[in-house]
Amino acid sequence: MKKRLFTLLLSASALLPCMAQITVVSTSDIRKSEPIDELVFRAQYEQTVVEDSTKTDAQPNTETMMLEIGKKSSVYYSYTAYLRDSVLLADVENNVSQDAMNEHSKAYGNARVTYQIYKNYPAGKVTTLDRIVTSNFRCEEKNEQPQWTLLPDTATILTYPCRKATCHFRGRNYTAWYTLEIPVGEGPWKLCGLPGFIVKAEDSRGHYTFTCTGIEQCKVVKPLLFNGKGYESVSRKDLNKIYERYAKDPMGFIASTAPNVKVTMTDENGNVLKHVEFPYNPIELPEK
């Protein structure tokens, strides 16, 4: 099958207030999924992120995320990215034109969140898959769980009675609300390890918030899929350096890693920008 890439023309007037991932989708990369577990239930979250922490009036950006939980492992990913890839896969199977594929891609847009996080896959590990422009990265780490402090506070969220817990994890202080009515120690992103399911979590700065908006029990057998074969293996330290490098000079990053991809950024007046820098407020911060 001939590999197809999408050339992007982006307006920086929309991109500059926040860090947007520029992802060039290759149709050769969206077929490589394999079943690794059997899905038990899935939850939907609204993830809000303040991407420019240098501005006191910065507005958060919101992305719909999905958490799929299997019998042994889980995966957390962007619903926008899932929809885009599903449509492109259907386009490839139906052999639609390049122009039609470009239009379909524009209809869903680029997901702000491009990573997928697999907890306990492989066993005892957390695997992060991410695609930056045309580069695919795979980062495996020890499945480190937060050390929670359980508190007596209660609340009702999504009709579930919830309890409060706090922790310090990966450079941030988090408050989480979990329900014992779903006795599964899972949650969004890398947050897990409580006696029940996390329905809401927020860091103390209000930069990252995860709010569950729906939970669905799987009544038919469905696989939990993994698509990280062929990805470049990197350490967490190196992956963080890649994120930082991309944020400081996305145009230079594209030029050096994807010379065949042409990306043009313009200001609100249509003037082409030679240099762009995105705000950088990663969820994982270095410990002081």
Image: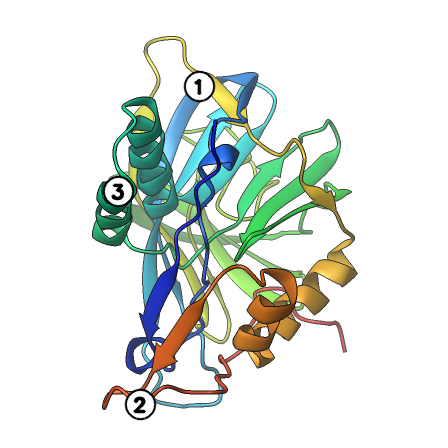
Q: Secondary structure at mark 3?
A: loop
| Residue sticking out furthest to the top | 221
Which numbered disc, 1 or 3, marks the residue that appears first in the sequence? 1
Q: Residues within 10 Å of mark 1 (few under 14, many from 20)?
A: many
Q: Which dot, 1 or 3, sits closer to the camera? A: 1
Label annotation for residue 271: 2
Label annotation for residue 40: 1
Above or below, 106 relative to 268: above
Q: Secondary structure at mark 2?
A: loop
Q: Is residue 88 visible?
A: yes
Q: Quadrant of the C terminus?
A: bottom right
Q: Residue at x 59, y 76 (%)?
A: 252
Residue type for callout 2? Asn
Q: Which dot, 2 or 1, sits closer to the camera? A: 2
Which numbered disc, 3 or 2, marks the residue that appears first in the sequence? 3
Residue type for callout 3? Leu
Q: Secondary structure at mark 1?
A: strand
The quadrant in which residue 209 appears is bottom left
Above or below, 87 relative to 7: above
Mark 2 and mark 1: Cα distance apart in space: 51 Å
Q: Residues within 10 Å of mark 2 (few under 14, many from 20)?
A: few
Disc 3, disc 2: CB below 8 Å?
A: no
Residue type for callout 1? Val
Label annotation for residue 158: 3
Q: Residues within 10 Å of mark 3 (few under 14, many from 20)?
A: few
Q: Is residue 146 left or right of residue 211?
A: right
Mark 3 and mark 2: Cα distance apart in space: 47 Å
Which numbered disc, 2 or 1, marks the residue that appears first in the sequence? 1
Label annotation for residue 22: none
Picture coordinates of residue 8, whole percent (x, y): 37, 62
Q: Is residue 140 left or right of residue 129?
A: right
